Image (tube, rainbow, N blue to C red):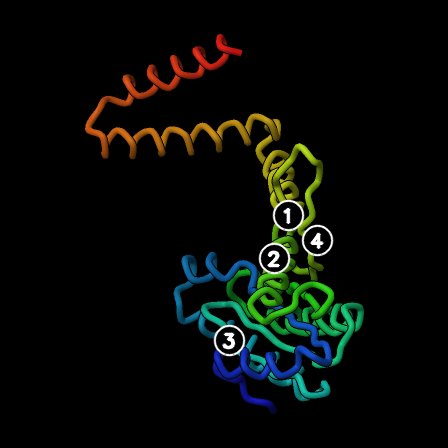
Amino acid sequence: MPEPLPADAWSRCLETQLPAGVAVGFLDVDGLLAVNEGSGRTAGDRILARVADGLGAWAATQPPAPWCRLHGDEYAFALPGAALEEAFLAAEALRARLDATLATEAVGRCSISVGVAQAPRDAADVPALLRAAETACRLAKEAGGGRVGLPVKEEMVLKSCYYPATAVRRLRLLAERSRRKESGLLREAVERLLVRRLRLLAERSRRKQSDLFREALERLLAAHDAQ
């Protein structure tokens, strides 16, 4: 059974595969935090051991499929020469296999989410490729977990909207879960940012936040009157 590579060695191995094309999977265990909190870290470590064993056994059935543990409950694997569609099917088979294994655990309810990305389709270097796969995994988890996600192209949604598609999708999911309007959530985020910057500016200048806010408002009104 193929042993996991150290993360840095895995990255170097992946680097050599880029010219010929390579797909990457980013794997995360859903629900592990709840197991650690409810049943203790020993139970969580047992789940991680089963995931690692299952991933190694799966890798042995593939063409060369180097894999590694990134950190915590996050793992990565590479499929040299694979197209995105092939990587998706392979990742789905792996996910189903690991889910079936974890279903026999007596504690908690864990599942597996995987994100896949492919070079050169989604990125041209190793860090960007891994980020694309991680983003796809995060989208899979946000959709409920226990599934395989694909990367979303980071394109501008509208000329007047400078937010990447992944951020807009996450905002929409948060709005649905909290039953609030997207505009209200976005306004709240901007207000928090402004308040934080105002607090830092007040500390640096040793002035009151209210005075700084009043000064900024007066400048805004003066600029508007001058137009």
Q: Marks 1 and 2, Cα distance to the nearest angstrom?
A: 8 Å
Q: Residue lying furthest top in this view?
A: 225
Residue under label 4 = 153
Q: Is residue 177 above or below residue 89?
A: above
Q: Nearer the viewer, residue 4 or 24?
A: 24
Q: Residue at x 30, y 30 (%)?
A: 199
Report the quarter where the N terminus lies: bottom right
- Which residue matches tag 1? 166
Query: For this rendering, which residue is in front, 97 or 117?
Result: 117
- Tag 3 or tag 4, which sits nearer the N-term? 3
Q: For the point 62% across and 39% down, which residue is it? A: 162
User: x and y percent of residue 123 in the render?
Assistant: 66, 65
- The tag earlier along the polypeptide, 3 or 2, is 3
Q: Earlier in the sequence, mark 4 or mark 2?
A: 2
Q: Which kind of residue does numbered mark 2 sit on?
A: Thr
Say which mark, if any, is on residue 69. Answer: 3
